[in-house]
Image (cartoon, grey):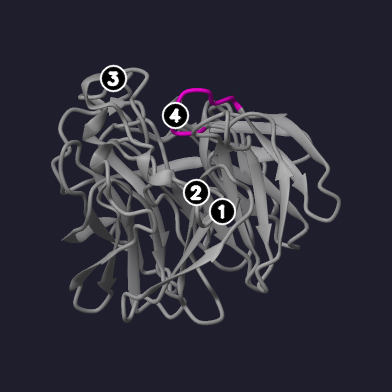
């Protein structure tokens, strides 16, 4: 059956069984958020013993956000974990600048980490009131995060449980929040246009992307709902992550391994292209040549849908689908474009503590145990910002 004709719109939660989950999720929560583990996050937590000189972090090292703990972990892609740094409760997305500093969205604030010395430099608290600091899938606090091309501003999507989120703007020199913009519900992902003139918050629970002008901070809502909005907060069929196409600045949002929403952020118009993986999709990233990589987390309905996978979609729309073992969440690509790194953390239950390393030429895949429920991931490079989508 054509992936564009399947009856996905009926796949929503049963309201009587999902009242608590209707505040936010893809599907009913397997457990309520719980209080944070009590990390004060007031001092750096180096990965080297006190008094010892840290070993410089080599290029090509991976940095992952450990959503299941209060740390980020440095990972040698061949040998595994090199050490961890405490950053704050339940870190989600992260981005790394050309200066080697990582900005990590936690439930408490945005942590600033020197990736070369492997220490936390600061924790920037949010201006937005997100309620008690908790952990778990629906916790308040930072989710998607991005860096302006000139490195002067960090943009973080802040989830407010039960309501609309915000986009907070951080000055990277002063490490202070300078502006706050209202966006949609549960901003899973944040991206920036190549010229830095616009910021895009992908809002999971309101079926939309908020387009924000970087100069005036004026927001504009663009609905992205290729299956419609039937089911509301209980629907599975919501946007998760966005990639900005290098060739024309259009936004690419994958849905269910069936439909790719191609959004012109200037006009708000959406075109739909077919996809082939037939699986619930989350993380997405794009390479400089326009190759799109999308993480398939697994089936909504095991009787109809395929399992976890990594889709590699060429600029001409042809796709290669690499099966993966178990749910995954996010993806990044090595600097030479030959290897994909896919985190096994997953925002829902079923996660595992590691990453899958995929050879994009052969499809060979190996699993590497790292971190605790790793979500966001970046490759440390000498030039240019890197980010998990």
Return the x and y of residue 381 as percentages of the image width and height: 64, 59
Task: Give the residue at mark 1.
Answer: 3
Q: Residues within 10 Å of mark 4 (few under 14, many from 20)?
A: many
Camera-side residue of 288 and 147: 288
Please tell me in which quadrant of the rendered image residue 212 appears: bottom left
Task: Give the residue at mark 2.
Answer: 6
In this picture, residue 163 sits left or right of residue 213: left
Return the x and y of residue 27 as percentages of the image width and height: 36, 31
Q: Residue at x 44, y 29 (%)?
A: 348
Query: Helix, strand or loop at disc 2?
Result: loop
* Discs 4, 2 touching: Cβ within 8 Å: no
Query: Helix, strand or loop at disc 1?
Result: loop
Task: Give the residue at mark 4.
Answer: 348
Residue 107 forms part of the magenta stretch: no
Task: Give the residue at mark 3.
Answer: 32
Mark toward the viewer: 4 or 2: 2
Decide which of tag 3 and tag 1 comes sooner along the chain.
1
Camera-side residue of 217 and 169: 217
Query: Helix, strand or loop at disc 4?
Result: loop
* Discs 3, 2 touching: Cβ within 8 Å: no
* Discs 2, 1 touching: Cβ within 8 Å: yes
Residue 352 forms part of the magenta stretch: yes
In this picture, residue 333 sits left or right of residue 119: right
Q: CA distance from mark 4 to mark 2?
A: 24 Å
Q: CA distance from mark 2 to mark 1?
A: 6 Å
Magenta range: 346-353
């Amino acid at each position: 059956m054509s992936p564009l004709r399947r009856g996905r719109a009926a796949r929503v939660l049963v309201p009587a069984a999902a009242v608590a989950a209707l505040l936010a999720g893809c599907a009913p929560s397997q457990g309520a958020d719980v209080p944070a583990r009590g990390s004060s996050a007031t001092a750096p937590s180096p990965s080297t013993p006190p008094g010892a000189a840290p070993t410089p972090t080599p290029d090509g090292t991976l940095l992952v956000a450990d959503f299941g703990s209060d740390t980020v972990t440095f990972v040698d892609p061949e040998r595994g974990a090199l050490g961890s740094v405490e950053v704050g409760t339940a870190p989600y997305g992260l981005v790394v600048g050309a200066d080697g500093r990582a900005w990590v969205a936690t439930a408490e604030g945005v942590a600033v980490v020197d990736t070369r010395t492997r220490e936390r430099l600061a924790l920037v608290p949010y201006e937005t009131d997100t309620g008690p600091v908790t952990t778990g899938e629906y916790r308040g606090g930072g989710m998607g995060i991005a860096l302006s091309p000139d490195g002067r501003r960090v943009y973080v999507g802040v989830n407010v449980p039960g309501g609309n989120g915000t986009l907070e703007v951080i000055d990277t020199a002063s490490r202070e929040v300078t502006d706050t913009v209202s966006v949609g519900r549960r901003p899973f992902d944040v991206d920036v246009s190549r010229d830095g003139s616009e910021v895009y918050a992908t809002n999971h629970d309101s079926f939309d992307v908020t387009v924000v002008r970087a100069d005036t901070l004026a927001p504009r809502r663009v609905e992205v709902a290729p299956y419609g909005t039937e089911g509301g907060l209980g629907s599975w069929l919501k946007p998760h992550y966005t990639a900005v196409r290098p060739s024309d600045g259009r936004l690419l949002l994958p849905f269910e391994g069936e439909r790719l929403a191609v959004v012109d952020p200037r006009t708000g118009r959406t075109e739909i292209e077919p996809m082939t993986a037939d699986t619930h999709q989350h993380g997405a990233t794009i390479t400089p040549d326009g190759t799109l990589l999308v993480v398939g987390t697994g089936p909504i309905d095991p009787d109809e849908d395929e399992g976890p996978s990594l889709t590699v979609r060429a600029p001409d729309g042809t796709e290669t689908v690499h099966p993966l073992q178990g749910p995954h969440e996010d993806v990044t690509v090595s600097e030479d474009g030959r290897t994909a790194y896919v985190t096994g953390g997953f925002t829902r239950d079923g996660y595992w503590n590691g990453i899958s390393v995929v050879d994009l030429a052969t499809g060979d895949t190996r699993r590497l145990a790292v971190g605790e429920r790793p979500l966001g991931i970046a490759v440390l490079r000498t030039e240019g910002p890197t980010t998990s989508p």
